[in-house]
């Protein structure tokens, strides 16, 4: 059974719309992250949370807003979608933030913005 | 600035050969180094990591990597390669300054039967 659940697996959106990507982890981890993988760039760190607190934000645009309602949930709201937002978004978690901790990734949500 | 370079975008080998995927990093202090693998259509999976200690670290699926401080490299190795090793491999660096991983652009490995 997958320990990090991302929903939906595929998402098609129109330019200007808003979507929420869901992530839940059942590993008992304290830190959660969002990464983006697009065709032309290396895996890109977006956000990190530790104990439901935002720790790092490397996303230049405020259109991307993480939301943590529970310790094991970290959703990603994206507003005013643009075609350049098309990518696979991976949620990840680790026991604690950084250092020697190993990242565990979800299966990803593939977003296509038309 | 910290960075990770995987100079080979693609590597093709025949099954049974020895594989070595290159990774170099730029960081002035002691790095934490990781290798992850992404099989087609799947997410990233942890292979191994170097934190400190022995320069050769062993990971899952029969892989190992050697940390060489002298030339700032952390190459991934396996012998013999199997067709099931075909995947994209990512090297990553964590500097400890903000706990973010810096990723290489990946090497796509194709193992021919």
Image (spheres, rainbow, N blue to C red):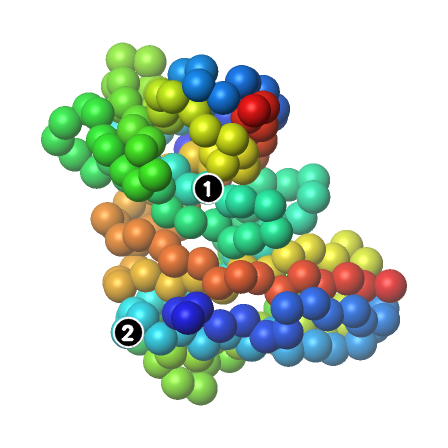
Q: Quadrant of the N terminus of chain A?
A: bottom left
- At horizontal 31% and vertical 52% (from top left) the residue drawn is A102
Q: Nearer the viewer, residue A72 or B58?
A: B58
Residue A7: x, y in percent?
59, 75
Distance between the alpha carbons at the discs numbered 1 and 2: 23 Å
Position of A97 with respect to A77 (left or right) is left
Instruction: In the rendered view, tell whether residue A74 sits above or below residue B23.
Output: below
* x, y percent for residue B26: 40, 26
Residue B111 coordinates in the image, percent (x, y): 55, 26
Question: Which quadrant does the C terminus of chain A fall into?
Answer: bottom right
Specify the farthest residue to the left.
B53
Determine which residue is flagged by label 2: A28
- Up-down relation of residue B35 to residue A33 (above or below): above
Q: Residues within 10 Å of mark 1 (few under 14, many from 20)?
A: many
Q: Quadrant of residue B47?
A: top left
Disc 1 and disc 2 in contact, CB within 8 angstroms: no
Q: Residue furthest front?
A: B113
Residue that appears at 52% across and 54% down: B43
Residue for point 45% across, 58% down: A105
Q: Which mark is residue B54?
A: none
The residue indicated by pointer 1 is B37
Question: Which chain is home to disc 2?
Answer: A
Seen in the picture, residue A78 relative to A39 is either above or below; the reply is below
Left/right of residue A40 with respect to residue B98 in the rendered view: right
The answer to whether any part of residue B26 appears in the image is: no
- Placement of A78 over or under B51, stated as above or below: below
């Amino acid at each position: 059974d997958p320990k990090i659940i991302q929903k939906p697996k595929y998402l098609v959106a129109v330019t200007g719309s808003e979507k929420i990507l869901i992530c839940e982890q059942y590993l008992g981890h304290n830190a959660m992250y969002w990464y983006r993988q697009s065709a032309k760039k290396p895996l890109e760190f977006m956000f990190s949370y530790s104990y439901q607190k935002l720790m790092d934000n490397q996303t230049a645009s405020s259109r991307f807003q993480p939301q943590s309602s529970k310790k094991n949930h970290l959703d990603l709201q994206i507003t005013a979608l643009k075609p350049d937002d098309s990518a696979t978004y991976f949620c990840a978690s680790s026991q604690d933030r950084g250092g020697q901790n190993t990242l565990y990734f979800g299966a990803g949500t593939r977003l296509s913005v038309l | 600035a910290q960075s990770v370079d995987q100079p080979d975008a693609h590597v093709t080998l025949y099954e049974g050969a020895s594989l070595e995927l290159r990774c170099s990093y730029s960081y002035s202090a002691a790095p934490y180094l990781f290798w992850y693998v992404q099989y087609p259509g799947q997410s990233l999976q942890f292979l191994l990591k170097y934190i400190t200690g022995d320069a050769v670290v062993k990971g899952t699926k029969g892989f190992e990597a050697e940390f060489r401080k002298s030339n700032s490299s952390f190459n991934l190795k396996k012998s013999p390669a199997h067709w099931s090793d075909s995947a994209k491999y990512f090297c990553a660096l964590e500097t400890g300054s903000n706990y973010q991983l810096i990723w290489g652009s990946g090497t796509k490995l194709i193992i021919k039967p």
